[in-house]
Amino acid sequence: MQTQLDWSTVTTIREALTRASSFLREHGANDPVFEAELLIRHCLDWDRTRFLIAMMDPIPPEAIEKLDELLLRRAQHEPLQYMFGSQEFFGRLFHVRPGVLIPRPETEILVEQVLLHAAKLWQGDEADVLTVADIGTGSGAICITLACERPSWEVTTVDLSLDATVIAKENAERLGAAVRFLQGDLVQPLLTAGEQVDILVSNPPYIPSADVDELDAEVLEHEPRLALDGGTDGLDCYRRLCEALPALLKKKALVAYEVGIHQARDVADLMKASGVIDEVHVVPDLAGIERVVIGVRR
């Protein structure tokens, strides 16, 4: 068995948990016991119930070898989601790997608000076939979720990153989502084609450039900077998106953006300044941070 940590005194799952959590604590993990449990369960392919029941059982040598490798990767701040290759979003499992931003729970609020406001704005038959554009595909979490939740909607997504598009296409095929994928800079492919949409949704890069370098190593060293850096004040993408609204939106339309901390009011003002948004709503996340900005054109 080829390992780099000392596992000589480890024979049971409980002992492996103690050894792994101690190693993670030494390397700055915020919740070393929780992370150690996740890593061991991943190596054994067990759910939590089976794990807890079998704490005193022997741990197989092949699991120790795999755990040893994962711990060394985690010591380099590699995100657990990249190590496991997946992240749950809106009840579905999305494959993720370097090249795409890991879906966050806050973005589920963005999707929820799109579904909620669309149901209010469109009723009856007109709600059945709506054209949707998701700007900034990433793993495909937003566009694929909307396509799965509302199969009759015509969903298009745009991303500048070819790597992200490849991963999102894999997720769409695996989850059975009908999504059209375009490659390009924000809404430019849609404007070039003269297309208009009923719903525009985006979780664009919104971290101010100077703040990106201050992010946790787990994010800074592993997740794509292209999906993080929003320019000097973090609002570059919102300005461009809002400038395009008059040409991009149909006569009745919905716009939904996820935003960073302290950005909601500025983004709401940019929406209003477009001249085509009649009302704006700001929605907080579970921590009370203003996280989603909704614009409605009636």
Image (cartoon, grey):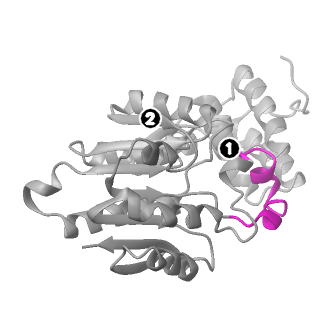
For the residue pair 296 and 113, the one nearer the viewer reads as: 296
Figure quadrant of residue 262: bottom right
Per the image, label 1 sits on a secondary structure element best described as helix
Identity of the residue drawn at 36% across and 75% down: 277
Q: Quadrant of the N terminus?
A: top right
Q: In the image as oriented, which residue stretches furthest toward the top?
A: 1
User: Which amino acid type corresponds to the residue marked 1 in the rendered image?
Assistant: Leu
Per the image, label 2 sits on a secondary structure element best described as strand
- Place of residue 297 in the rendered image (x, y in percent of width and height, measured from the top left): 30, 72
Rate crowding at label 2 as few (under 14), some (14 to 19) or many (20 or more) other CA atoms within 10 Å.
many
Q: Which residue is mark 1?
A: 80
Q: Tell me: 89 left or right of 131.
A: right
Numbered circles on residues, count: 2
Q: Is residue 68 above or below residue 215?
A: above
Q: Tell me: 156 left or right of 64.
A: left
Decide if residue 109 is in sight here.
no
Q: Earlier in the sequence, mark 1 or mark 2?
A: 1
User: Which amino acid type corresponds to the residue marked 2 in the rendered image?
Assistant: Phe
Q: Which residue is mark 2?
A: 181
- Place of residue 80 in the rendered image (x, y in percent of width and height, measured from the top left): 68, 43
Identity of the residue drawn at 53% across and 58% down: 203
Q: Which residues are magenta?
A: 207-224
Whether 210 is among the magenta residues is: yes
- Place of residue 278 in the rendered image (x, y in percent of width and height, measured from the top left): 33, 79
Decide if residue 224 is in sight here.
yes
Q: Quadrant of the C terminus?
A: bottom left
Mark 1 or 2: the one toward you = 2
Q: Tell me: 233 left or right of 91.
A: right
Task: Give the distance between the C-alpha atoms of the residues marked 1 and 2, in whole angstroms.
Answer: 28 Å
Identity of the residue drawn at 78% across and 24% down: 65
